[in-house]
Image (cartoon, rainbow, N blue to C red):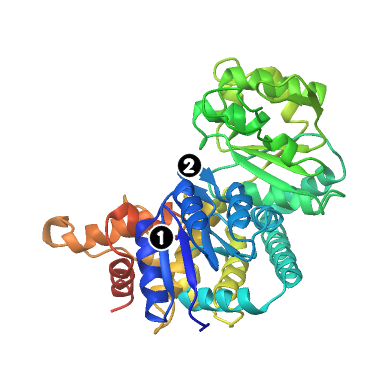
Amino acid sequence: MINPRRILIVDDDKLFCDVVSDYLGADGMEVITSHTGSDGIAACSSQRIDIVLLDQNLPDAEGHTLCSSILGSNDQTKIIFITAHPSFEGAVKAIKAGAYDYLSKPFELEELSLALSQAVQTQDLERIAQVEAYRTGKEREEAVIIGAKGLTEVSRLADLAAASTAPVLITGETGTGKNVVARAIHYRSPAKGAAFISVNCAALPDNLIESELFGHEKGAFTGATASKKGVFEMAEGGTLLLDEIGAMPLHLQTKLLGVLEDRQVRRLGGSTVLPVGARIVAATNSDLEKALGKTFRSDLYYRLSVVHIHIPPLRERREDIPELCEYLLRKMTAGREIRLSREEMDSLMRYDWPGNVRELRNILERACIVQEHGSLRPSGLIFRGDRSNHGAATTSAPGGIQTLEQIEKEHICRALSSLSGNHTATARALGISLSTLKRKLKGYGPK
C-alpha cells in the first residue's frame, strides 16, 4: 500500500475505527483512534501525525471546523474527510477548510488504501478536479431522475424556477426525490457554480436550529466560544434548501418570514445586519395546507410557495420504473449492462413502493450485494409487512407463523433500508459487527 506512517482516525463510530485500525495495522501502519474532536486535537498537538481520517459529524464538533487546529499542529498532515452523508457542498467545504481528500461511507478498504497512497503522491489541484467530477456525476443523476416520463410537469416547473430567484416549495412523499429536484433547480440556474446548502429542519435540536440557520456571535449563549456563520451566510450567492420545513418551530417561522421579506439576517447576539443573497427552496412531506393556522404560518406558506412543485409518488408513475432500474443498476455496477427479466420487472412494477425512488434504489443495491452470484431478483428482497402487495411472498411456518429467521431477516432489511443502505450505521444500530451483518446479508440471497 504505502510506506509505514502514523495515522489518526477521528470518528465516534467505534466499530468503524476497529475495522479500519485492524486493516491498516496489518499493513504496517501505526494507527491512533479518537472518538471526539477535542481528543483528536489533543493527539495532533502531542505528536507528529501524517494522515488524519476525520469524520464530518462528531459529538462535539463538525469536522471542517477542526482542520485549522490540526494543520496548525502538523502543517504537513494530510486530512481525509469521511462522511455517511456525502454531498458536493460538503466536499467543497472540506477542501476549502484544508482537507486533502473526501470519502463517503460505506467505502471499500481498497478505496481507502488508494486514497492514502494518493495522499502521498497527488497534488491538491487534482483533488479539486475530482470534486468537480463528483458534481458532474450528480448533475447527470438528477437529469435522469427528473427526466423520467412521469415527471414532465416537474421538470418544466424546475426549469421555470431556475430562471427566477423566487422561493420554491417542493412537496411529495418521503423518497420521491425532493432533494434531487432542488439540486436540479440549482444546477439549471445561473447560480450553479455557487454553493448548494441543505439543512434538515427536523434533524436539528430546538436549541441549535436558530444558531444553524442564522449563525451566532462569540458569547451569544453558553458554549458559543467562537462566532459561527449560519446557513444563510454559507449559501450566499447560491441555493439554500430548508428540508422538512414543516417541522420548524412557530417562533422560527416568524423569523424566517422576516428574512424572506427583508432579504437580510442578523446572527444571534450580533448587531450587524447581513444581506441574504441565497435562493430559498423549501421541501416537506407534510400536508402544509392542513397545518395552516395550526402548526404552520399561513403567510410563510404563501411566501414560500411562489413556485410550488409537487412530486407524484412512484406508484402513480410506474412507467418510470424500468428506466430508473436500468440507470441505477448501471451506476451500482460501474457501468455493466444488467437487465432484469421480464417477470422480475413486472413484479417490481406491481409493487406500490411506499418508500418511492429511495426504496427502489435500496432494494436494487441490496440485490447487487446479496445476489451477486446469480440472476438479480430484487422483488424477493422487498419487505412486505402486511403481505398485501403483489410479488414474491415470504414463506411462513405452518399456521402462518413466521420463523425467527424470517423475522430477523425482515428486521435487518428494514433497518438497512431506513438507514439508506449504510452498512456501518446499520450494524451499529442493530448491535452486531459489520462482518456479521455482511455475512447475514449474503445469506439472504437466492437459495
Quadrant holding the C terminus: bottom left
Q: Secondary structure at mark 1?
A: strand
Q: Can residue 423 be seen in the rendering of this structure?
A: no
Crowd rating for badge 2 (residues with CA inside 10 Å; few <14, some 14–19, many 20+): few
Left or right: where does residue 401 sit relative to residue 186? left
Left or right: where does residue 188 sit relative to residue 378? right
Give whichever of 330, 134 is nearer the camera. 134
Q: Can residue 175 be seen in the rendering of this structure?
A: yes
Q: At which x and y percent is residue 390?
A: 39, 59
Dot 2 and dot 1 residues touching (CB under 8 Å): no
Dot 2 or dot 1: first in sequence order is 1
Residue designated by label 2: 60
Residue designated by label 1: 33
Going 69% across and 45% down the picture, which residue do you hit?
Answer: 197
Give whichever of 109, 305 is nearer the camera. 109
* Residue 379 figure quarter: bottom left
Q: Please tell me whether residue 203 is drawn above or below residue 356 in the rendered image.
A: above
* Residue 143 figure quarter: bottom right
Q: At which x and y percent is residue 192?
A: 81, 52
Total residue callouts:
2
Name the amino acid, label 2. Answer: Asp
- Residue 219 is labelled as none
Farthest front residue in view:
46
Q: At which x and y percent is residue 31?
A: 42, 68
Name the amino acid, label 1. Answer: Thr
Between the residue at mark 2 and the residue at mark 1, the CA separation in whole angstroms equals: 16 Å
